[in-house]
Amino acid sequence: MNFRKASALILTALCLLLLLNCCTVPTKSRSYQKSDIAMGSAVSVKLYALGDADTEQVAQQMITKIKQLDTLISKNDENAFLYSLNQKSGQTLETDPELIDYIIKTKEVYALSDSKLSVTSGALTELWGFDTDNFRLPEEAEIKKAIPFCSDEGLTVSKKNLTVFVPEGGIINLGSVGKGIACDKAVECFNYSSQSCQGAVISVGGSIAVIGSHDKKQDWTVGIRNPFGEVNDYFGTLTVSGTGFVSTSGSYEKSFNLDGKSYHHILDLTTGYPVETELVSVSVKADSGLLSDALSTMCFVLGEEKSKDILNRYNAQAVFVYKDKSVSVTDGIKDAFKIVNGEFKPI
Amino acid sequence: MNEQRKLASPLQALLILLLAAAATAFFFITRPDRQDGAVAVITVKGRVVKEVSLSAAEDELITLDNGVVIEFTDGKIGFKESGCPDKICIRTGMLSKVGESAACVPEGTVISIEGKAPDIDIISY
């Protein structure tokens, strides 16, 4: 074989190699994952894409958006819009349209809670130190004094004028919906991205959003945390098709013990004390992160019976977990939810 | 010459086939893929500072610049020491499955196990 023929052969081989690389890569889904800390919690985003979509770019955009949200809705960050709003309670103030939107939507949901929850809950949550992780048991007199400042009755929000009036002494707290709103922002990023990714999984401190699909299977599997275990321990799984939002509220999160009594962070604003309930956690699947966050808190506070109509109204589903490890789920997810830990029993 | 008009002799055809096979093998070998092994990715303030393959044979104690100590033993990884007040990161325990993660929020540090085909995609907590 002469030199020319040999080079022709090598060339053929190289062409084949190129061809193979070109044809094979796009049929396989790639994934890219990024973790960070934002909104006082762990954030992770995982992107799936076919073809040459820049998953890294989308992941970075999502994280950036979530971090920006902190400077809008944080109650404790001095640079945040919400912080300055709270500093000037008793005045009608013009503010950011997005912030107005979050306040209106959250207020609307909590209006169904028989005054047990509100947007203006800051006076009590600050008293207990739940916003700053400096937990303390307040004096009864302090609690009685703070309760009237936690009502949404005097809170006036105008979408048209972009103004908010917080009654004097009132403190708006979007902490119970912040992580869900962050999920909404990430999904928005995904939907408006110039990169055509195929699917994504987002977690902001345990509030979850899933979008689109994987390569191999169409559905997503979301684990529901074992309320008696640590973060990575799940007792059940919920199958979600396409886009969905899942949030969990539980008494295991942000709690402290004092003189043999346990205090958790979900307050009943009519009593000023942590809600007394047989529930240990409630997970809610809804159409937005704000809703899944707000509704999981509300279902925990109201209990299963009173929650049903409200869940229906928002086309949402829920998993209720009780202290005796019995588990109840709403009809809409009976088939999608599975218990994977034998200690838990369906009701 | 007659010989020159032939496209390829049987020997040459065989050589082409062999080279094609080699090219295919080369492609599959060099293709970047994490399919076979879960990897623990450690990030501080959003930046990846270290990756540890969970199939690595050697145990390791990793001290990060922020003083956080991470332990890798028997294919499992977790927080061992941290200057944070609540120690939630250490309580989370050792991670070994794809999809698991542990975070130390005060120190800005996250360990997450990445890889293919997890049993679940994510956990709501």
Image: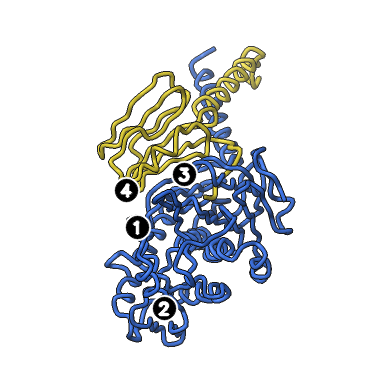
Dot in front, 2 or 3 = 2
- Mark identifier at residue B106: 4
- Seen from the viewer's position, the closer of residues A134 and A174 is A134
Q: Amino acid at mark 4?
A: Pro
- Mark identifier at residue A136: 1
User: For mark 4, does the 10 Å Cα neighbourhood hold few (<14), some (14 to 19), or many (20 or more) residues?
Assistant: some
Q: Amino acid at mark 3?
A: Gln
Instruction: Report which residue position mark 3 lands on.
Output: A33
Instruction: Report which residue position mark 2 lands on.
Output: A148
Dot in front, 3 or 1 = 1
- Specify which label sits upstream in the sequence, 1 or 2: 1
Dot in front, 1 or 4 = 1
Q: Secondary structure at mark 1?
A: loop
Q: Which chain is blue?
A: A
Looking at the rendered structure, the number of numbered marks drawn on it comes to 4
Q: Secondary structure at mark 4?
A: loop
Q: Residue at x 37, y 59 (%)?
A: A137
